[in-house]
Image: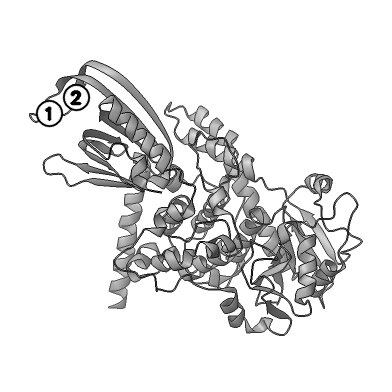
Amino acid sequence: MEFSEHIKTANVEDVVLRQTLHPPSRGTLCVTGHHLLFSDREEGSCRQVLLLLRNIDAIEKSVENLLAYSCPFSNAGHSQRISGSSGTISIKCKDLRVLHLDIPGMEQCLNIARSIETLSCLEAVSEMYPFFYRPSNASLQDQWGLSSPEKHYSQMTELHDRWRLSTVNRHYSVCPSYPPAVIVPKNIDDAMLEKIAKFRQRGRFPVLCYYHRKNGMVIMSSSQPLTGANRKRCMEDEFLLQAVIDGSDKGYIIDTRSSQQALQARITGGGFESKSGYSSWKRLHRQMERGKALQESLIKLVEACGDESHNMDRWLSKLENSKWLSHVQTALSTAGLLAECVERDGHSVLVHGSEGTDSTLLISTLAQLIMDPCCRTLEGFLALLEREWVQAGHPFQQRCSHSAYSHARLQQESPVFLLLLDCVWQLWRQFPLALGFSEALLLRLATEAYASNYGTFLCNNQQERCVLRVKENTRCLFQALLRPRERDGYSNPLYEPTELAIWPSVHPQSLQLWRGFFLRWTPQARHLEEAQEEIRNMIIEWGKLALS
């Protein structure tokens, strides 16, 4: 496809950009295949705004004929009276920015709007900007990614007696959403894994995602068993879970659905692990919202944050009705339960919901942050995200195709990854010394998941990335974030490593709205950001003085 086919008007002069936190400015607007570029033409100004079209969630346009339109700009500094037609395009971004473009000429305005609508919604992954992004300081030959299942297994020598690395999925034929190599109990051969995969939804058989060095317990993840209305069983699946807790009296299964939802799943062929087949496992149900309910919660929260009525009662009512903070509370409390089972009770845990690609990954990641100090460093946290979200098959392309402003009918969008980052921010706020990264990293990741120069969050699983040769043709975000210049900006200068678990408080009064993200384009948030940056610089300077 030629991008030029969708660009009827490439440049427009005398466009006025209106944006929160900035005075209106007049300049030139350019449309390319992947970006909007606004260049301020006012004398003495060098302001430019470069917006990735993929970051645009929705646009609204209004066109009107103007017999006597008062323009706020003129060479003499006074307003001018002009005749003709004009249009305004309001651009609402996935990172919650809102920009307004006043464009002279009805035809030009409509052409620009059509180009934005088409180019911001390209469906072919190979046409997206990461395949065209070529920064001067990086090469396609650079290492892609921080780790792999093979490297992770080789580093965990304690596993080797009872666990093995299986390549049963090397051609993605057993489970399209799993990586080619996975860690499983040593006495479970590949033929057994193939049978178990047929018994689990979309082939996501139980695999190891975390080994707790303190006591040897593990966290496994999978999708739901396909027991159905006839209560089917799979002896190989039962044998695998028994092998996980060999030598222990019991294990826990944390099901992220309510018991009623798990029962109802049998009607459509799903189900749960029965007591008769898994007698050594105790099932715990913790309902976590997903899909449409979570997306609608985000939409309501963003709407509340944009309320300009300045009525505190109305604002608090809207915030409560969005239920976003209750989702944060549920995620943190369920992750705390998982960590408690492993760390305090000394038992292994299997986590799953229905498909095992959303809430399962969410609570497994948070539990590892709670328990494991290695996951709390900057590099450790990025490696955790790569392992638990990118390699483990979270469908980023589907979940992050739209954010809170889109007018499109909801399909498979769901802000699960954004919910994770919000929960991590709550941990960061409650334990300001325990995490080796800053809020700036979480904000960057929240933006990159929805629209990025990098290929890390493209596609829905490793198989799709392999087919499109994403690793060969794009840059890795995590590698870029760890370059010295970037690393300094995303490190926590107050970081003091601790071997202790960090147990979050989930009382309502302990949880706060993530202002840095949801209110980041307001004057109040900008003042807070400037103050935090000043404090950060002071801490860094004090650190240098202490070393000298």
**Which mark is on residue 71?**
2
Q: Residue furthest top?
A: 67
Residue visible at 36% across and 42% down in the picture: 5
Task: Give me the residue at 24% from left, 46% from top.
Answer: 48
Which corner quadrant holds the C terminus?
bottom left
Relative horizontal placement of residue 333, taking residue 251 as reference (left or right): left
Could you tell me residue 398's position as x and y percent?
Answer: 56, 49
How far across and how far down the image is residue 343, in percent? 69, 69
Q: Could you classify mark 2 by the number of other residues whose Cα lies within 10 Å: few (under 14), some (14-19), or many (20 or more)?
A: few
Residue 244 visible in the snapshot: no
Residue 307 in sight in this render: yes
Query: Which residue is situated farthest in the left direction here?
Result: 76
Query: Quadrant of the rendered structure where residue 12 is?
Result: top left
For image coordinates 43% across by 26% down, the residue present is 309
Residue toward you, 530 or 57: 57
CB of mark 1 within 8 Å of CB of mark 2?
Answer: yes
Q: Position of residue 25 (x, y in %)?
A: 21, 36
Kind of residue at badge 1:
Ser
Q: For residue 74, which numbered disc appears in the image?
A: 1
Q: Quadrant of residue 483?
A: bottom left
Colour logic: one colour
Q: Is residue 357 left or right of residue 42?
A: right
- Residue 299 placed where, x, y %? 53, 37
Hey, what amino acid is under mark 2? Answer: Cys
Around disc 1, counting alpha carbons within 10 Å, would you say few (fewer than 14), some (14 to 19), or many (20 or more)? few
Between residue 43 and residue 11, name the one nearer to us: 11
